[in-house]
Image (cartoon, helix red, strand yellow):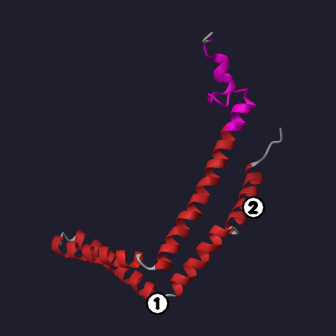
Amino acid sequence: MEKYTKDDILVRAHELATMIANTEEVDFFKRAEAQINENQKVREMIASIKSLQKQAVNFQHYGKEKALKLVEEKLEKLEAELDEIPIVQEFKQSQVDVNDLLQMVSSAISNKVTDEILLSTGGDLLTGETGSKIKNSPSSC
């Protein structure tokens, strides 16, 4: 069995990152983000949301409950309006798709490492026990 160093693994991780960055999911994400950045209405709405969020933090800090409630209502309305814009929906979906891809890769790596550990110790993939655990547990026969 070949041994790898942390540096070897980092090189491969960078290769994998480059592969992921060149997927259709990431490409769509970049295009959707560019469209959002080019959309004046969306940019203005995002700026308004950020401003209202700052106001909300200040009102909360100073205990101004009525003002906070009004700002939160405005925020909710503006966020709902923003979410209705098709390019925003596409952008949010693209974020979910890229995140799903990253989670899939992370899970695949984690599962493969676990399987390799079990197999290399003479363990059992079905029970998830390493060889040393099997060897040192009382026999059930």
**Residue for point 68% across, 68% down:** 21
| Crowd band around label 1 with a 10 angstrom C-alpha radius: few (<14), some (14–19), many (20+) | few
Amino acid under disc 1: Gln
Q: Which mark is residue 15?
A: 2
Residue 140 rendering spot, x and y as whole percentages: 60, 12
Res. 138 image quadrant: top right
Residue 124 image offset from top left, x and y in percent = 68, 27
- Badge 2 local density, few (<14 within 10 Å), some, or many (20+)? few
Instruction: Using the image, tell me which numbered label, if any, was put on residue 135.
Output: none
At x 70%, y 35%, the residue is: 117
Nearest to the eye among marks 2 and 1: give it.
1
The residue that label 1 is drawn on is 40
The alpha-carbon separation of the residues under discs 2 and 1 comes to 37 Å
Residue placed most toward the observer, 82 or 55: 82
Q: Is residue 69 above or below residue 99?
A: below
Q: Earlier in the sequence, mark 2 or mark 1?
A: 2
Q: Residue at x 68, y 42 (%)?
A: 113
Q: Is residue 92 left or right of residue 68?
A: right
* Numbered range of the magenta stretch: 115-139
> Where, quadrant-wise, is the N terminus in this rendering?
top right
In which quadrant will I find the C terminus? top right
Q: Label 2 sits on what residue type? A: Glu
Q: Position of residue 12 (x, y in %)?
A: 75, 56
Q: Is residue 93 shown left or right of residue 122?
A: left
User: Residue 55 placed where, x, y %?
Assistant: 28, 77
Quarter-of-image position of residue 75: bottom left
Residue ID at (53%, 64%): 96
Of helix, strand and loop, which one carries label 1?
helix
